[in-house]
Image: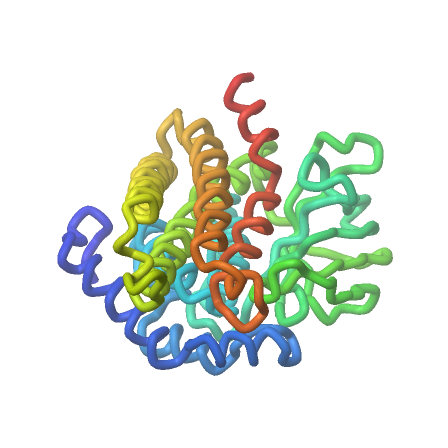
């Protein structure tokens, strides 16, 4: 296996293309919509294929834990393709948030216990974090290893096998710790939530005096996970924005008005050129944040927050423009552009809204 330092641009391009081809074959619009209505709201066969045929879940996990020994930069390639397809698979929830939390904690025993199954995709994980106000403070508290409280907005919590829980202490909410819980343990209640974005399942997870295994971690574990999450989310947003632009170009190139294709009108050409610039600027910002996170640079948190602000705002702007350029069909359930618009709206709220991220950068 090549080390992260020796993964070439050609290898990375081949990885991205293999993922894109698999998603092209297995995750078309009809499949995405069907999975969003299925039990658990994920495409389990597609997830199994991504893990067994390409090893997507193993990319950022070290070889000593049965992973591929690459980095989160390679996982970001997978996320970009998943974002293009809006594929309802737990790449972000299980690979980035759950496995990423374990990796960030650096506890050897927890890593040996959890990462091999997460790397194979045999088990999936979900991160329980946000309280009712959002990600400013955990919704769960820990006392003597027992968890109580409610975590909101848990990604793919319905289908997770293991829960990684960021918890505060009842006597000191700022002292946050990381815990492991079997998703089917007594006292754990998972409630599916109605969502704006049907391609991303969210749940509420309640803990009623649930015994947990504490994972040794630093006191800044929540902020480290937030930095990773924002950087990786930006890669998914790049993929979604790029696909939204493609759909817009396809639509305006095939529809006619006054005997001309819509794409031939200068105003629409300029609008789509601006959208292209937005996508490429998002790509550069995302790449800078991910590189900083992978190499654990001092500016990683700042760049991740900047990527969240920039990519969220531009994804919102681009998909809004795409809706306008599609005309009346753009606001119908039947057309896929509306799904990207909803994903952009939902993504901007994850792990702290853009204005919260901007405040963190300014501080």
Query: Does residue 30 sit above or below 266 in this rendering?
Result: below
Between 48 and 20, which is closer to the camera in this rendering? 20
| Quadrant of the rendering where the C terminus is positioned | top right
Compared across the picture, whether 220 is left or right of 144 comes to left
Compared across the picture, whether 94 is left or right of 69 comes to right
Residue 23 screen position, x and y as percent: 36, 73
Q: Residue at x 73, y 71 (%)?
A: 184
Residue with the most extreme top position: 363
| Quadrant of the rendering where the N terminus is positioned | bottom left
Q: Residue at x 77, y 33 (%)?
A: 173
Q: Please give the count of numbered marks on the rendered protein.
A: 0
Query: Does residue 90 sit above or below 32 in this rendering?
Result: above
Q: Residue at x 53, y 62 (%)?
A: 328
Quarter holding residue 292? top left
Residue 257 screen position, x and y as percent: 36, 62
Residue 133 screen position, x and y as percent: 76, 39
The colour scheme applied to this rendered structure is: rainbow
Q: Residue at x 79, y 64 (%)?
A: 188
Residue 322 screen position, x and y as percent: 44, 53
Q: Is residue 66 visible?
A: no
Between 40 and 63, which is closer to the camera in this rendering? 40
Between 17 and 179, which is closer to the camera in this rendering? 17
Query: Does residue 179 sit above or below 37 in this rendering?
Result: above
């Amino acid at each position: 296996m090549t080390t992260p330092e020796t993964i070439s641009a050609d290898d990375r391009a081949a990885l991205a293309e293999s993922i894109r081809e698999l998603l092209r074959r297995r995750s078309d619009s009809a499949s995405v919509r069907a999975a969003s209505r299925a039990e658990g709201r994920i495409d389990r066969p597609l997830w199994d294929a991504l893990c067994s045929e390409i090893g997507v879940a193993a990319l950022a996990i070290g070889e000593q834990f049965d992973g591929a020994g690459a980095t989160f930069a390679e996982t970001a390639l997978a996320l970009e393709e998943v974002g293009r397809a809006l594929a309802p698979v737990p790449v972000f929830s299980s690979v980035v948030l759950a496995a990423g939390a374990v990796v960030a904690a650096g506890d050897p025993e927890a890593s040996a216990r959890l990462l091999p199954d997460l790397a194979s995709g045999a088990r999936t994980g979900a991160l329980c974090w946000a309280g009712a106000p959002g990600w400013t403070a955990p919704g769960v508290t820990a006392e003597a290893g027992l968890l109580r409280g409610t975590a909101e907005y848990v990604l793919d919590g319905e289908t997770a096998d293991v829960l990684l829980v960021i918890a505060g202490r009842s006597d000191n909410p700022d002292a946050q710790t990381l815990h492991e819980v079997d998703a089917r343990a007594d006292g754990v209640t998972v409630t599916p939530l109605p969502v704006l974005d049907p391609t991303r399942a969210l749940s509420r997870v309640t803990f009623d005096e649930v015994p947990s295994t504490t994972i040794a971690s630093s006191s800044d574990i929540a902020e480290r996970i937030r930095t990773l999450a924002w950087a990786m989310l930006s890669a998914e947003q790049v993929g979604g924005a790029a696909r939204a632009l493609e759909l817009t170009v396809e639509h305006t190139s095939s529809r006619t008005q006054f005997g001309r294709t819509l794409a031939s009108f200068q105003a629409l050409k300029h609008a789509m050129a601006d959208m292209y610039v937005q996508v490429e600027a998002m790509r550069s910002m995302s790449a800078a944040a991910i590189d900083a996170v992978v190499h654990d640079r001092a500016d990683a948190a700042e760049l991740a927050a900047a990527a969240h602000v920039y990519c969220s705002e531009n994804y919102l702007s681009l998909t809004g423009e795409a809706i306008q350029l599609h005309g009346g069909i753009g606001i119908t359930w039947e057309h896929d552009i509306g799904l990207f618009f909803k994903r952009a709206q939902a993504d901007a709220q994850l792990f702290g809204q853009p204005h919260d991220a901007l405040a963190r950068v300014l501080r």
